[in-house]
Amino acid sequence: MINPNMQRAYEEVLKLTAAEKMMLISKILPELSRELKKDTRLDIYDLKGLGKEIWKGIDAQEYVNKERDSWE
C-alpha cells in the first residue's frame, strides 16, 4: 500500500517532461546510493540464532555421528 505522500509525489512526477524526470532521477539516485551504503553495514553477529528452530529437539552429537557414518 502506497502512502498518501508518496502517491501525491508520484502523481506530480507523472506531470513532468521526460527530461525533467531524468533530471529528478539524477538528483535522487546519488542520495539513495549514499543512504543504502550507510544502512547496509553487515554484522556477523546479526546471524546469531538464525534457523535455530530447525535444530530444536535434535542432539548435535548424534546428528554428527549419523553424518559421519553415512560417509563410509
Image: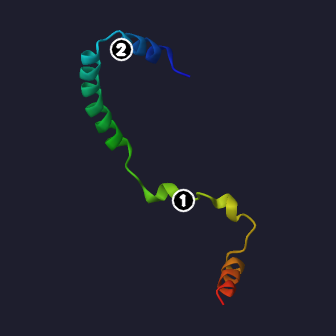
Q: Nearer the viewer, mark 1 or mark 2?
A: 2
Q: Which residue is mark 2?
A: 13
Residue 57 x, y percent position in the rendering: 75, 67
Residue 58 x, y percent position in the rendering: 73, 70
Instruction: Report the side of 68 relative to 12 (left or right).
Output: right
Q: Looking at this rendering, what residue extends furthest in the right direction?
A: 57
Tell me the quarter of the picture where residue 26 sits: top left
Between 52 and 1, the residue placed more toward the observer is 1
The residue at the point 40 percent across, 53 percent down is 42
Between 65 and 46, the residue placed more toward the observer is 65
Q: Which residue is mark 1?
A: 48
Q: Looking at this rendering, what residue extends furthest in the front direction?
A: 18
Mark 1–mark 2 Cα distance, whole angstroms, equals: 43 Å
Q: Looking at this rendering, what residue extends furthest in the bottom direction?
A: 72
Within 10 Å of the Cα at label 2, are there few (<14), some (14-19), or many (20+) other Cα atoms?
Answer: some
Residue 63 x, y percent position in the rendering: 69, 77
**For numbered disc 2, what is the local secondary structure?**
helix
* Quadrant in the picture for the C terminus: bottom right
Tell me the quarter of the picture where residue 59 sits: bottom right
Q: Is residue 38 above or below residue 3?
A: below
